[in-house]
Image: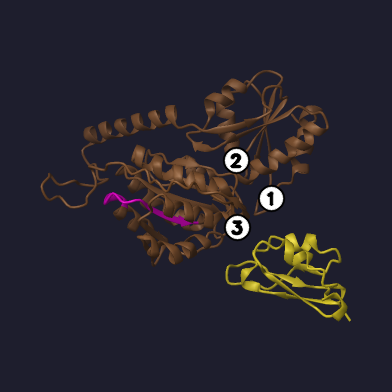
Amino acid sequence: MAKILMKGNEALSEAAIRAGLKAFYGYPITPQNEVPAYMAEHLPLRGGVYLQAESEVSAINMVYGAAGAGVRVMTSSSSPGISLKQEGISYIAAAQLPCVIVNVVRNGPGLGGIQPAQGDYFQAVKGGGHGDYRLIVLAPGNVQEMADLTTLGFDLADKWRNPVMILSDGILGQMMEPVVFSEDGAVSEVDKPWATNGAAGRERNIVNSLDIIPDKAEKNMLRLLEKYDQIKAEEVRWQEHNTEDADVILVGYGTSARVARSAMELARKEGLKVGLFRPITLWPFPEQRLAELAKAGRSFLAVEMSAGQMIEDVRLAVNGVSPVHLSNRLGGMVPTPEDVLEKVREILEGRVS
Amino acid sequence: MPRGQVIVNQELCKECSLCVVACPHGVLAIGKAINKKGYHPVEAVAPEKCTGCTMCAVMCPDVVLTIKRKSPERK
């Protein structure tokens, strides 16, 4: 199929509809408005339900209901709206229901602004809502991946009966790039014998997250943790460039990875041995591969549009074997390749502790 | 008299600044107004310098800009 020029938010929406999306519930917020706008225009004509809820809290609970009924369902928002959805996300994770939640991150905390940032990393990968649960978190790095990882997100959600978050940002959502959709049109539907979709002729299914008997609740938790361990073993994804001989490995995801890649190319032109490691799954984090790459004489530089969040996972993975530094911008500002390159020079010349 | 005139469709602008960089004469800058999405749309801050070259409109990914050319020989 031919390349189409699309905004990231639109590419993600089109991919979701092609993945067999049956219901979208959302509430407007910049910079993700193109998602509900696209859904409102296209989803009803292609066999789905589009509904603008009265609030984010309402939207996520509609997702909870539709996911329980076993249909492919999605919601999208941006940072403050995702905060409002956290209670529902925790319930959905506890009830082990598949859905896709899109966060086109803007700068925070609080109402913040509408410019791109990555400050929701902790919220996405460490919990966000209450209790011991995990989301599978996918971090697209371009408009094509906004589409491809959305498709993958629905498959992973169904495969693991777990909510999946697409952690994008205000640049990836708004920027336009060529995108290609596969022509086969096949939707990978899985059997959902647990769904509450009418109990005629069978025992009724119950979707619930209430667990008041402690020893039973603990057993359920252990089953959940076993699932998370399996996801960690099977679903880690990342990309690396020029890491073999690198003295400094830049680590970044999403928009930061694009900036880091340009910085790496500038550095290589100067003869500096710089590589790039780009996590695609933020949970599960590619900690094992980072641990393998860690060695004496090699440094890591986390490139973020947050105050030093992902760097904590890099440090846990590297476990003290190599030094880990930070290059970041905040408040909706985007780092430049030159900023990152300067930090690389500081590291190589021993000007940082 | 400027040879061109930039017309901004404010609601489509996402404040990406690509046109500001693309304009060879410094005609455009991010403005102070706020559109419905919350972005500050671009403004022609030096309209007298516009030559109607359309570089800004060609660069804009969101078809925000329309350029009117004023000199007949450049049609």
The kind of secondary structure element at disc 2 is loop
Quarter of image, res B19:
bottom right
**Label 1 chain ID:** A
What colour do you see for chain A? brown
> Residue A269, image x and y in percent?
81, 33
For marks 2 and 1, give the CA distance: 13 Å
Q: Which mark is residue A144?
A: none
Q: Do callouts 3 and 1 mark residues in contact (Cβ within 8 Å)?
A: no
Q: Amino acid at mark 2?
A: Tyr
User: Residue visible at 48% across and 55% down?
Assistant: A14
User: Residue visible at 25% across and 36% down?
Assistant: A217
User: Upstream in the sequence, badge 2 or badge 1?
Assistant: 2
Q: Amino acid at mark 1?
A: Val
Give the labeled residue for mark 3: A174
Q: Residues within 10 Å of mark 1 (few under 14, many from 20)?
A: some
Q: Amino acid at mark 3?
A: Gln
Residue B71 visible (yes or no)? no
User: Upstream in the sequence, badge 3 or badge 2?
Assistant: 3
Give the labeled residue for mark 1: A334
**Label 3 chain ID:** A
The kind of secondary structure element at disc 3 is helix
User: Residue visible at 15% across and 47% down?
Assistant: A204
> Residue A76, image x and y in percent?
46, 56
Give the labeled residue for mark 2: A253
Q: Residues within 10 Å of mark 2 (few under 14, many from 20)?
A: many
Residue range corresponding to the magenta coloring: A67-77
The kind of secondary structure element at disc 1 is loop
Residue A14, magenta (yes or no): no
* Viewer-nearest residue: A257 or A184: A184
